[in-house]
């Protein structure tokens, strides 16, 4: 069984895509590889009709859960809620706005079958033509941050922050996650690498958001990444603790 975690915050404009672009694609993959999927939607205190629309579109899914936070607690908090409520042996995280494509779930799985790695991470930077219409300043920022992590972690990771990944559920057993915001993805990958777990990247395209708006707060993101980088230095080079 695979748990597909989809965190949502005010994504009412994107959910109508699911009946055409998400559910049938996952169903096809599920049948092709004879795998069960459960959907775990985490509605993170949306103030729009995310919850209502999700309930409408999901009525005929076989296995699904919708967990709601009573207030907006952030992407990291939502992913942690998703992990805690998952019952699969593997977890796949996907953006609610489908900027990473559900079709590429198959690529995550194929790489996992081949390598049995603890984490398969989708990277839009492994192949040049895989970034579609990202604003130049975000691209620059993202590439700079990736370079810092790559040097610090001593591993050829081209992209530290994508949400689009497959994890073995067991990797979270002894991992205490602190981040409540977007840096959760960098925190998980850093902890996996530092703890000697196997991480493989695959190239995946990243498309532009078609509906709704991006929730990322770039300033907050930079600060959170600097704090996380400080912790990595402390743990990796000075044998300190993560807290
Ligand atoms: N649960 C939760 N999800 C969030 C939050 N902010 C963003 N997301 C989700 O995280 C994913 C990425 O966010 P998005 O706004 O598209 O950021 P971007 O892709 O970096 O521009 C989407 O699925 C969002 O719905 C949040 O505060 N809580
Ligand atoms: Mg997005």
Image: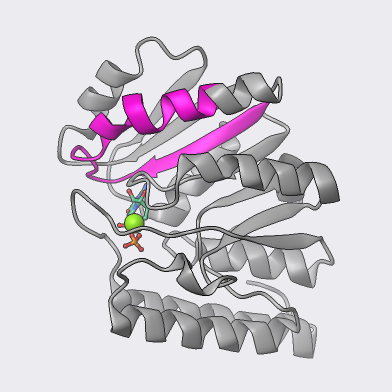
**Taking the image as drawn, is residue 173 in sight?**
no
Magenta residues (range): 1-27
Is 17 contained in the magenta span? yes
Quarter of the rendering containing residue 152: bottom right
**Considering the image in quadrants, where does the N terminus appear?**
top right
Residue 37 coordinates in the image, percent (x, y): 59, 24
Q: Quadrant of ligand 2?
A: bottom left
Snapshot quadrant of residue 53: top left
> Residue 1, relative to residue 203: is it above or below?
above
Q: Is residue 146 above or below residue 182?
A: below
Image check: 38 left or right of 131?
right
Q: Is 80 or 94 nearer to us in this picture?
A: 94
Left or right of 151? Residue 105 is: left
Residue pictured at 28% horizontal, 76% vertical: 135
Q: Quadrant of the C terminus?
A: bottom right
**Camera sees residue 102:** yes
Between 30 and 178, the residue placed more toward the observer is 30
Query: Residue at left 16%, top 41%?
Result: 47
Query: Which colouring convention does the figure follow?
Result: one colour
Horizontal and vertical percent position of residue 160: 57, 71
Position of 145 relative to 123 (above/below):
below
Q: Where residue 16 sits: x, y (%)?
A: 24, 30
Q: How many marks?
A: 0
Q: Residue furthest front?
A: 129
* 70 sits to left or right of 62: left
């Amino acid at each position: 069984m695979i748990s597909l975690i989809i965190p949502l915050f005010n994504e009412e404009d994107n959910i109508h895509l699911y009946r055409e672009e998400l559910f049938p694609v996952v169903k096809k993959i599920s049948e092709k590889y004879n795998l069960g999927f459960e959907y775990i939607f985490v509605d993170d205190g949306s103030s729009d009709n995310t919850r209502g629309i999700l309930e409408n579109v999901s009525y005929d899914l076989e296995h699904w859960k919708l967990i709601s936070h009573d207030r907006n607690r952030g992407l990291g908090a939502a992913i942690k809620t998703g992990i805690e409520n998952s019952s699969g042996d593997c977890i796949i995280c996907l953006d609610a706005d489908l900027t990473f494509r559900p079709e590429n779930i198959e690529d995550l799985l194929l790489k996992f079958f081949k390598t049995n790695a603890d984490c398969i991470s989708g990277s839009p930077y492994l192949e040049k033509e895989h970034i579609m219409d990202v604003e130049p300043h975000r691209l620059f920022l993202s590439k700079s941050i990736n370079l810092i992590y790559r040097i610090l972690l001593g591993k050829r990771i081209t992209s530290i922050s994508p949400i689009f990944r497959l994890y073995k559920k067991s990797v979270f057993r002894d991992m205490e996650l602190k981040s409540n915001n977007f840096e959760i993805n960098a925190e998980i990958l850093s902890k996996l690498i530092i703890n000697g777990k196997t991480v493989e990247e695959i190239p995946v395209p990243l498309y532009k958001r078609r509906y709704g708006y991006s929730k990322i707060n770039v300033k907050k993101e930079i600060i959170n990444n600097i704090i996380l980088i400080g912790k990595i230095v402390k743990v990796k080079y000075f044998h300190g603790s993560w807290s």
